[in-house]
Image (cartoon, grey):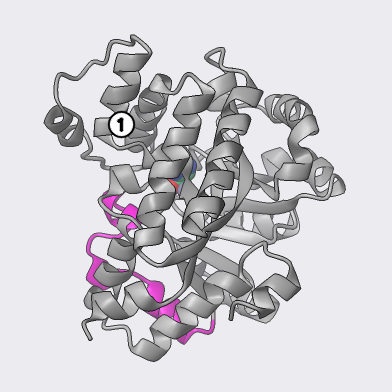
Amino acid sequence: QTTADFIRGLPKAELHLHIEGSLEPEQMFEFARRNRIDLPFKTVEAVRAAYAFSNLQDFLDIYYQGAGVLQTEEDFRDLAMAYFRRAAADGTVHAEIFFDPQTHTDRGIPFAVAADGLLAGMAQAERELGVTSKLILSYLRHLSEEDAFKTLREAEPYLDRMVGVGLDSSELGHPPSKFAKVFKASRERGLKLSAHAGEEGPPEYVWEALDGLAVDRIDHGNRSLEDPVLVKRLVAEGMTLTVCPLSNLKLCVVDDLKNHPLKRMLDLGLKATINSDDPAYFGGYIGENWTATTEALGLSRDELATLARNSFTGSFLAPDEIASRV
Ligand code: HPA
Ligand code: ZN
């Protein structure tokens, strides 16, 4: 049995996926055509050629531009279903997906259009593919906390169908503490909390996510390893890190997958998971992330089983649902 087959056969959850980041160039052209939008690119190849990033901001600029083709509920539903088909083919049985409401409301697309479309795609995926999922609304950290509060108010009618909130976009200069009040308000509405921290930002941002936001999960968390006291804290709490190896490579967070910290994280006792982040932009879905990382770091089958188990125990599924899946 090849490593790729072994990985495909392992039931897995994906915990860090931005649905807007699953927009493949082919689909970008399809949505642009049906919505009569002009793209600055002529061909799929030209789009792919533009996906050479030297940091997070480089990527974000083109990612927000790409999201402009998403106009209707059907676009969001089709986007989600295309992701779930890929996920199912890789042996992903559960996915917790982020969406960025402000990216859409700021260009005049109502919150409900994005939310209803994604929820329809999620329901269809469960029916047709047997893949379960949860939706996480993510606040854009380059915008103000007041803007995040506005998003939380818009989300109010949907909160029974959202599992939690996240914090993404440009990390440097936008520490978690900037969003302490809106995270507290989100928690009071029964939502789980996660925040991107320690992708480009320093270990202090991870401390802030823990102490200032009281997060349930850290997205990325790579730079935690620079602070041994922080590592001890994360291990003691059993805090889940949603690590994204191919994303880290594409955004130059690591220079080579062979130097990726994932194995070191496991050796230190950290509860790491493997995720795809923005698969259409970073060169791979969950399967490619798992196989490339396994090859680069020489992960054992025991370690792969641990990673699969972490993906469920670190999920926002209810305890009885987790127990039935691990
Ligand atoms: N980091 C921050 N913001 C993001 C990312 C990421 O990896 N992907 C989509 N938005
Ligand atoms: Zn991310």
* Relative side of 159 to 254, left or right: right
Say what amino acid the circle numbered 1 marks.
Answer: Gln
Tell me the residue at 69%/71% (across/down). Answer: 321
Residue located 55% across and 53% down the image? 126
- Image quadrant occupied by the N terminus: bottom left
Q: What stretch is highlighted in magenta?
A: 247-269
- Where does residue 261 sit, x and y in percent of width and height? 37, 72
- Does 14 appear above or below 182? below
**Residue 204 in the image: above or below residue 178:** below
Question: Do we see residue 230 in this rendering?
Answer: no
Q: Please indicate whether residue 162 sits to the left or right of residue 44 in the image.
A: right
Could you say which quadrant of the image residue 320 lies in?
A: bottom right
- Residue 293 quadrant: bottom left
Identified at 74% across, 59% down, the residue is 211
Q: What element carries label 1?
A: helix
Magenta residue check for 250: yes
- Percent position of residue 33, x then y: 29, 15
The residue at the far right in this view is 188
Does the image show residue 90?
Answer: yes
Identify residue for label 1. Answer: 27
Decide: is 85 above or below 315.
above
- Viewer-closest of 170 and 165: 165
Does residue 280 belong to the magenta stretch? no
Q: Where does the image place residue 251, in percent across and percent down from the top left? A: 31, 48
Q: Which quadrant would residue 312 be assigned to in this image?
A: bottom right
x then y, percent, for residue 153:
78, 27
Residue drawn 63% across and 46% down?
Answer: 136
Residue 272 drawn above or below residue 140: below
